[in-house]
Image (tube, helix red, strand yellow):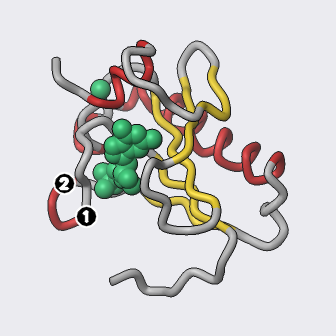
């Protein structure tokens, strides 16, 4: 399978890894859209949010908890941040391995474009 995020998980491509455990990995986005821009992913390949099953609920929860822990660790929990998951073309998804964006360090506009 030719998935760039699976290659990051396997160490076949370099990544600036901030956190990992048996199921989850977090790393800096290669093209940051804010002063802090992290991606939190499941290590297991899941292409889109549409591929989630009820058994994945705890895993997705772990992505969110990891995002909140990173916000504390990097000191933007109080100032604020945004988490977002894009799905398919209209959602702006460009990598087909689900990932949670964590954006912080500036005032983010709402609604997104
Ligand atoms: P999407 O558009 O699918 O929601 O987000 C994909 C994100 O992955 C983009 O923000 C993009 O900059 C990031 N990205 C793409 N390729 C790589 C890579 O090889 N390494 C890292 N760290 N980020 C990547
Ligand atoms: Zn993958």
Q: Residue 8: which quarter of the image? A: top left
Q: Position of residue 100 (x, y in %)?
A: 47, 48
In front of the other: 76 or 86: 76
Point out the residue furthest to the front here: 14
In front of the other: 51 or 16: 16
Residue at left offset 55%, top offset 28%: 25
Disc 1 residue: CB within 8 Å of ligand 1: yes
Q: Which residue is mark 2?
A: 88
Disc 2 residue: CB within 8 Å of ligand 1: no
Q: Which residue is mark 1?
A: 91
Name the mark on residue 42: none
In front of the other: 7 or 63: 7
Residue at left offset 38%, top offset 31%: 54
Mark-to-mark CA distance, 2 and 1:
5 Å
Tell me if label 2 and label 1 are in contact, CB under 8 Å. Answer: yes
Above or below for 20 versus 47: above
Q: Position of residue 33 (x, y in %)?
A: 48, 67
Above or below for 111 versus 88: below
Q: Position of residue 21 (x, y in %)?
A: 63, 18
Q: Tag 2, which secondary structure? A: helix
Residue at left offset 23%, top offset 51%: 94
Q: Quadrant of ligand 2?
A: top left
In the picture provided, is 53 more to the left or to the right than 41? left
The tally of labels here is 2
Q: Residues within 10 Å of mark 2 (few under 14, many from 20)?
A: some
Residue at left offset 24%, top offset 34%: 47
Q: Residue 95: which quarter of the image? A: top left
Above or below for 82 versus 106: above
In front of the other: 60 or 86: 86
Q: Quadrant of the N terminus?
A: top left
Q: Quadrant of the C terminus?
A: bottom left
């Amino acid at each position: 399978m030719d998935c760039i995020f699976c290659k990051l998980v396997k160490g076949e491509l370099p990544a600036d890894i901030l956190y990992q455990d048996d199921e989850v990995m977090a790393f800096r986005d290669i093209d940051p859209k804010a002063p802090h821009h992290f991606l939190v992913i499941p290590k297991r390949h899941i292409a889109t949010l549409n591929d989630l099953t009820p058994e994945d609920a705890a895993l997705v929860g772990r992505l969110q908890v990891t995002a909140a822990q990173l916000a504390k660790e990097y000191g933007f929990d109080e100032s604020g941040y945004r988490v977002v998951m894009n799905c398919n073309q209209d959602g702006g998804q460009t990598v087909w391995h689900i990932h949670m964006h964590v954006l912080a360090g500036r005032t983010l506009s709402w609604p997104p474009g």
